Amino acid sequence: QMHLVESGGGSVQAGGSLRLSCAASGYIFSGYCLAWFRQAPGKEREGVASIASYGIATYADSVKGRFTISKDHTQNILYLQMSSLKPEDTAVYYCAAEKSIGACPLSHVFKDWGQGTQVTVSA
């Protein structure tokens, strides 16, 4: 089982930027479908961005053009660069991983999850 630890959350004003990191231990990233999810108070968890083992990224419509998912294979770190943040981006953000060399849609079922990091965007 992959152990995932998120960091980089915090409070920012609307229009600002944050970069989230997800450090993985126990396995190497190659061969894994990786993703970021978020859950706002009173709402269901939603997929934000995913990246396949071969590098293709998928984004939720709500974050396209503002968020960028990337990964560092050498250090086993997954990133989420968030720009032009909006109050509606406020949520706990989670990283997730599942061993898969195929497509990596946001609807993929993920086995391993981090504990989450809070992002708060004020108007």
Image (cartoon, rainbow, N blue to C red):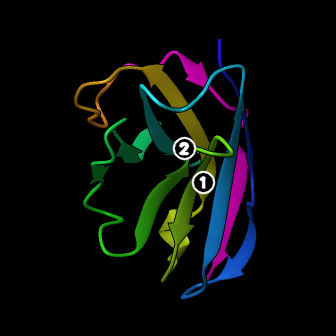
User: x, y percentage for residue 28?
Assistant: 60, 27
Please tell me which residue lies in front, 59 or 42: 59
Numbered tag placed on residue 91 in the rendering: 1
Q: Work out which residue is located at the far top of the displayed protein and give it.
A: 1
Q: Secondary structure at mark 1?
A: strand
Q: Secondary structure at mark 2?
A: strand
Indicate the amino acid at tag 2: Gln
User: Disc 1 versus disc 2: distance between alpha carbons?
Assistant: 5 Å
Q: Is residue 55 above or below residue 102?
A: below
User: x, y percentage for residue 22?
Assistant: 67, 45
Q: Quadrant of the N terminus?
A: top right
Q: Is residue 69 visible?
A: yes
For the point 36% across and 20% down, the residue is 100
Tell me where the magenta segment starts and ends, as one range: 109-123
State yes or no: discs 1 and 2 in contact (Cβ < 8 Å): yes
Indicate the amino acid at tag 1: Ala
Numbered tag placed on residue 39 in the rendering: 2
For the point 65% across and 59% down, the residue is 20
Please tell me which residue lies in front, 113 or 26: 26
User: x, y percentage for residue 35?
Assistant: 46, 40
